[in-house]
Amino acid sequence: MMQNGQPWLDTTGQPIHAHGGCILKYQDWYYWYGEDRRADYYVSCYRSQDLMHWEFRNHILTTTSPFKAERFQATAGLVNSDGTKVNIERPKVLYNPKTERFVLWAHFENGRDYREAAVLVASAATPDGDFTEHGHFRPFGNMSRDCTVFVDADQAYFISAARGNADIHIYQLSSDYLNVTRLVNRLWSNEFREAPVLFKHDGLYYMLTSGTSGWRPNQGKYAVASAIAGSWSDLQDFGDATTFDSQPAFVLKNGNQVIYVGDRWGGAKHYQDSSYVFLPLEITSQQVILKHKARWFIAAHNFVFKD
Ligand code: DGJ
């Protein structure tokens, strides 16, 4: 029995460090990627076949990750000139079947403040190999903070909080997933949303977001659209005023279950105490309801939620 907000241990008994992350299914494995702010690490990767037992695989992005320039010009470096760490948040990994590479997009900051507002791109030949950094930049010059990715058929998208977090931007990605090609939409001007999560259910697109209150949880909201380019509905509440003490990280589709995964942040001082919240999402007549279950239990390939 795993419990929301409690440490989730890997197969060696160590707490899983995969905050603000994502789960990617590739061949027979689920790969769980997320922030790992310990030592010289940035992003760590675990894998599982039953979503219950997670084997630590690798610190896929660290202060010593190799750099390789790509066709876009970007600032290189995962350490500041004074040797301090930068800040890599909300890493998301996509598999590109054309290039057969795993491509990571994340939010890049300098580790001192949030003024860089840039995206970091990295890639690797295997899901849990050492990723090569390709640098960070602002998509079409736009500020870009909390972010997510989404693949719909052949087309991949990058979604991020822009203009000082006032708006959410949706960008199309190039066919190699290494750059943005088009700003598809700007959403919810001046509504200040963070932590975007995009998923598809019964032919419709849903986006979850949080409000902006630093590490403190706030009211989650969702919107629905029949196409990614829009138009998107107005924002509506899901969960309670603190999204059951969590902030959206990603959504996991497991058979016909739609599972919300959020971060319960420890905050700046107690970041290492951050934990995970897994809750079922119920979607009926385009209404998204986050079911509050205090505990959850995972059996092989099936999430069973308990009150
Ligand atoms: C809210 C964001 O969603 C988190 O990823 C993190 O950047 C915190 N703000 C920092 O205050």
Image (spheres, grey):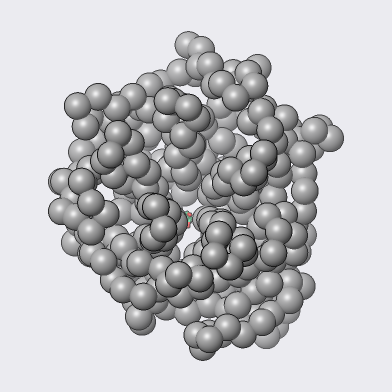
How many labels were placed on the picture?
Answer: 0
- Give the residue at x 55% y 59%: 97
Quadrant housing residue 240: top left
- Give the residue at x 64% y 21%: 300
Q: Residue furthest front?
A: 98
- Give the residue at x 72% y 54%: 128
In the image, 147: left or right of 188? right
Nearest the viewer among 178 and 8 is: 178
In x, y percent, where is residue 241? Answer: 31, 33
Q: Residue furthest top?
A: 307
Task: Pick the quarter of the image with the N terminus.
Answer: top right
Nearest the viewer among 185 and 10 is: 185
In the image, 159: left or right of 267? left
In x, y percent, where is residue 270? Answer: 62, 46
Quadrant housing residue 25: top right
- Give the residue at x 47% y 45%: 249
In x, y percent, where is residue 193? Answer: 30, 53
In x, y percent, where is residue 16? Answer: 70, 40
When the figure is inspected, residue 35 is found, relative to residue 295, above or below; the finding is: below
In the image, 11: left or right of 148? right
Q: Is residue 262 visible?
A: yes
